[in-house]
Image (cartoon, grey):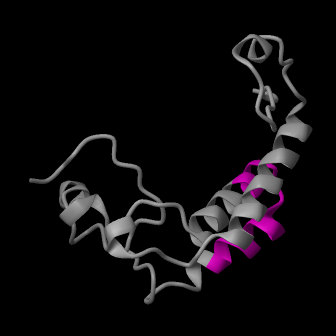
Amino acid sequence: WGGAPLITKEISREEVYKVARSSQEDTYKQAISDFEDAFNRLPDSWASSEAGRVTKYAAAGMLGRTYMYMHNYTKAAEYLGKVIEQEGTLYELVNMKIVSVTNIIMVKNGFGKFNIWVVLLVRLWD
């Protein structure tokens, strides 16, 4: 698909329409820079009242995914490994033979240890 328009500073609405599309390489460089910055600044986890906020390991997951798209499997394994290392503490794998997708979605507050990063757009509970 190629690159995307990169906006790295505040600009006016009029200026937005003038931003040219960047190269795919520059887009990946900016994404990696942003995710690495997030990984270094974000906490491991948030209090339950802050569920859904981005954590260090959500950034690591996105870094791993970005490196996968770039076919850099060594770096992908490095960052995805950081998430996997949290297995049993912050995260848990789900046995899909036992748990249905509906049950996963309907977990209290929409969050569970099997989620690395979830953004709820609608309220799923009372």
Residue at 49%, 76% in the rendered image = 45
| Span of residues in magenta | 66-82
Nearest the eye: 9 or 63: 9
Q: Is residue 69 magenta?
A: yes
- Indicate the position of residue 26 as horizontal and vertical percent values: 90, 39
Relative height, residue 46 to residue 124 (above, below): below
Q: Is residue 74 magenta?
A: yes
Residue 100 appears left or right of 82: left
Residue 67 appears left or right of 24: left
Residue 48 appears left or right of 38: left
Nearest the eye: 45 or 59: 45
- Indicate the position of residue 72 as horizontal and vertical percent values: 83, 59
Residue at 83%, 38% in the rendered image = 27
- Indicate the position of residue 21 as horizontal and vertical percent values: 84, 21
Residue at 41%, 65% in the rendered image = 115
Residue at 19%, 54% in the rendered image = 102
Relative height, residue 106 to residue 123 (above, below): below
Provide the major secondary structure of the magenta segment: helix
Nearest the eye: 31 or 99: 31
Relative height, residue 2 to residue 60 (above, below): above
Nearest the eye: 3 or 9: 9
Q: Quadrant of the N terminus?
A: top right
- Indicate the position of residue 68 as horizontal and vertical percent values: 73, 55
